[in-house]
Amino acid sequence: MPRPLKELLKGIIGEKATNAVGAFDLIGDIAVIRIPEDLREHAKIIGETLMKVNKNVKSVWAQIGPVEGDYRLRELIYIAGEKRSETLYRENGCVFKVDITKVFFTPRLSQERKRIAELVSNGETVFNMFAGVGTFSIVIARKKISTVHSSEINPYAYEYMLENIRLNKLKGNVIPYLKDAAEVAEELKGKVDRVLMPLPEKAIEYFKYALKSLKPHGFVHVYLHISYSKGSDEKEAIKRGAEQIPLGKVIYYKAVREVGPRTVQVVYDVEVTNHS
Ligand SMILES: C[S@@+](CC[C@H](N)C(=O)[O-])C[C@H]1O[C@@H](n2cnc3c(N)ncnc32)[C@H](O)[C@@H]1O
């Protein structure tokens, strides 16, 4: 939490609040903050204080549950400012419209999106299996001359992806599908240079579909959640995580964000050759 907010809250609700209220995500002009259950009665004052400290924040929401379900949504409650859940978020020279209550969205992968876009060569065919509102796809197509097939099953996320393709003038470069990634893999059979799998819960199960879409030589970016027990070596756990990947050569891996206590999201870049 930024220091001024901590100081202000200390004066208002005492020492315990400042230790318990975690860092917040800023998505456009909306802040999303985690507030532990025993401090929920102070949610409004926490939200209003956050707005005082950060003048760009116009609306504050509290995350009160984990990211869940097939659509990967988090339970949010409105706490202060404008009662609005839609915003415009800018990143990597792109703009994204999102409704934080209807779609998955995290600003914490912006560096990773940039990294992937830099790996793509001009002329590549990319398949983003779990596209959301089009974040990875749009950053890639903005930076490189490429075709990014993008599948998504949440109808709201799909509609926002259509809007974001329009906003970023990438019609024809990002190809949206309101379909299960497995079906799209079948349609793209053998045509893809690079597959993105930014959904840790399904990455291993869907790896066979990623392979189906790939050319004889290609790359797959697999995202997994890696947990490690207290006192054990995080680096070793991340390295061992690669053993879950059924095929190919892991050429790079890195923790891309923290997702819980002793749990990180890790990307594994996998090179695949001569698969069938
Ligand atoms: C963790 S989110 C990632 C979204 C996006 N790549 C991002 O980073 O903002 C995963 C997305 O995959 C979608 N999804 C889940 N199962 C799917 C499937 N079988 N086929 C296509 N999309 C799916 C969810 O609705 C969700 O929007």
Image: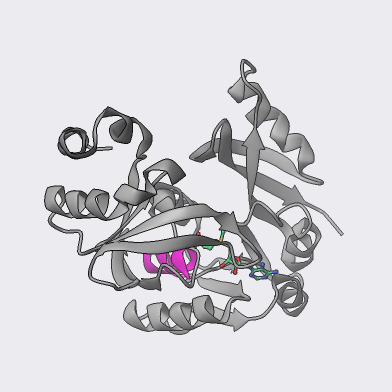
Residue, x 56% and y 56% (percent of image)? 67
Q: In this view, does 232 lie to the left or right of 247?
A: left
Q: Which residue corresponds to the image point at 75% horizontal and 71% vertical from the top-left?
A: 182
**Quarter occupied by the N terminus:** top left
Q: Can residue 28 be seen in this view?
A: no
Looking at the picture, tell me which residue is in the foreground, 184 or 77. 77
Q: Majority secondary structure of the magenta segment?
A: helix
Quadrant for residue 260, please give it.
Answer: top right
Residue visible at 55% across and 66% down in the picture: 124
Identity of the residue drawn at 81% across and 53% down:
274
Which residues make up the magenta segment? Answer: 134-145
**Where 77 sits versus 220, above or below?**
below
Query: What colour scheme does the image use?
Result: one colour
- Look at the image and tell me whether residue 234 can be seen: yes
Quarter of image, ligand 1: bottom right
| Rendered view: 81 above or below 166 | above
Outermost residue, top direction? 231
Direction from residue 251 to residue 21 in the image, left or right: left
Q: Residue 39 location in percent, x, y? A: 37, 43
Please state the horizontal and vertical placement of residue 149, each as a whole percent of the image. Answer: 58, 74
Quadrant assignment, res 194 = bottom right
Q: In which quarter of the image is the C terminus?
A: bottom right
- In the displayed orientation, state which residue is furthest to the right: 276
